Image: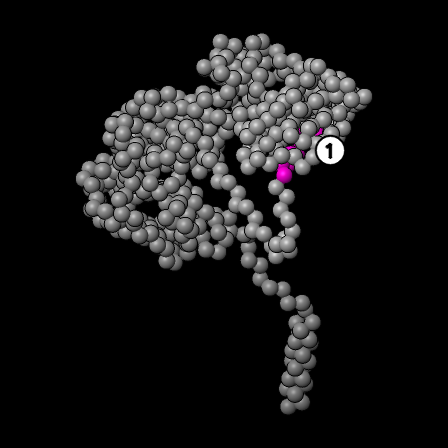
Amino acid sequence: MKKKASFLLLLLFIAAKLLLLTSCAGIVPPTGGPKDTLPPRLVKALPADSATNVTSQKIVLTFDEFVDLKDAQQNVLISPIPTKIPNIESNLRYVTVKLRDSLEKNTTYSINFGNSIKDINEGNIFKDFTYVFSTGPTIAHGQFAGKVILAETGKTDSTLLVILHRNLNDTAIYKSNPRYLTKVNGRGEFSFNFIEPGKYNAFVLPNEYSKKYDDSTEIFGFLDSTITISEATPNAVFYAYQEEKKKEKPAKAATPTNNNKNKKEDKSLKFANNLDGGHSQGLINKLQLTFSKRLKTFDSSKIVLCDTFYEPLPNAKVTLDTSNTTVSISYPWKENTYFKLILSKDVAQDTSGNTLKKGDTLSFTTATESSYGSVKIKFTNLDLKKHPVLQIVSSDKIEESVPLTDIVFKRKLYKPGDYIVRILFDNNQNGIWDAGNYKKHLQPEIVLERNWKLNIKANWDNETEIKL
């Protein structure tokens, strides 16, 4: 009995030791393994993907994990384009599409889900998944791809659509809905697949509800002729344009506050100038005065450019622009020189009969040549027969357009800064870009943009070579 008791005490002692050791050990939670980076995988489709002789208008797609459907109405493209908006839903591992149009006979349908399908846990996207079926015995394999370029800037726009019309009448784009459509990606590229072979008219439009060309301020593009779509259709390039620019709505006048009710409104004519810092005139630009209101009358003789001793300078030229708001003073400016510009009180009168409150004198100094840089650009493979125009662009604004008659462009003085160089092929040689006109089957003029950068440093010989 004593031996049994000793043995039991020994077991209890060992158990207590083990319990003490485990209680002192740190608790480490199990690791979850590597992060899931894989998109959902389609494991079943009913009807099957690429099925033929399909009659069902309901499609059920089953994935290997729970999925979510994001902005289906905006992201999912169904071809041919349905008349009635289909019902597209997700639930657990299933995505269900219910087509509300009657299915056409012997027609291939494709459903491109874009970036709408993703897994619920990690948000991994099943990119550009396309489901296909046919109501006939075969799947159509017509394809068509290419690129859309904005003709005026040479850039791309991912908000645009390319559409296809089976109706080859020129007026179909104004009156009818297209047969097929696809989106343009960030590189300006587009592609159609599973298209019924045949002849089509192709167009570019914004991604708007009507899918018709009913506004000349919309971005639009067309090809010069119909295209025949097959399994090996040549690629195409659209040059899209706005035939007319949208007119900006005039800003609403500010509502007077209570603090201003007792103050007399100053109706006198006012102007602003383009002097750098209010006192420095550039050597290569005009001095400009921009009036607050459109001018009814203007007397250029009552603006006088003088030297520092108030002696009038005979070579100054004063002009009013076509908007009747901006006056420009041209003069062969010399560096680091003092000038005065004298304006009489009655130099101008706006449409309400208001004049300047009083005469004014602007005192300013011209910049130095060292504050500018010289520039030399050599072009390789530039076809001068296409009437190229050099466009120097800053912050999407064309700073200067220069018709090129030589493969080398030189300028002694140029304002320092970072610029983008573009080339306009000026067909009518008017020095500006011209839009297209679909009714006249006139394509827009083309601007070539390859992100050619031009960095001009002050007091520096800036040289670069551009290869077309």
SS state under label 1: loop
Q: On the picture, is 78 further left or further right than 398? A: left
Q: Quadrant of the C terminus?
A: top right
Please say if 288 is above or below 83: above
Whether 313 is among the magenta residues is no
What residue is rendered at 53% in x and 25% in y? Answer: 322
Whether 270 is among the magenta residues is yes
What residue is rendered at 20% in x and 46% in y? Answer: 102
Quadrant position of residue 337: top right
Q: Quadrant of the N terminus?
A: bottom right
- Horizontal and vertical percent position of residue 273: 67, 31
Quadrant position of residue 393: top right
Q: Is residue 467 visible?
A: no
Please say if 416 is above or below 42: above
- Horizontal and vertical percent position of residue 304: 70, 22
- Horizontal and vertical percent position of residue 343: 69, 28
Query: What range is drawn magenta here?
Result: 268-275
Quadrant position of residue 458: top right
Pick the front one: 378 or 169: 169
Q: Is residue 128 visible?
A: yes
Protein image colouring:
one colour
Mark 1 Cα-neighbour bin, 10 Å: few <14, some 14–19, many ≥20: few
Q: How many marks?
A: 1
- Horizontal and vertical percent position of residue 120: 45, 55
What residue is rendered at 75% in x and 25% in y? Answer: 340
Q: Farthest bottom residue? A: 1
Q: Farthest right residue? A: 309
Pick the front one: 466 or 12: 466
What residue is rendered at 27% in x and 35% in y? Answer: 175
Please say if 282 is above or below 16: above
Reading the image, the residue beneath label 1 is 277
Mark 1 residue type:
Gly
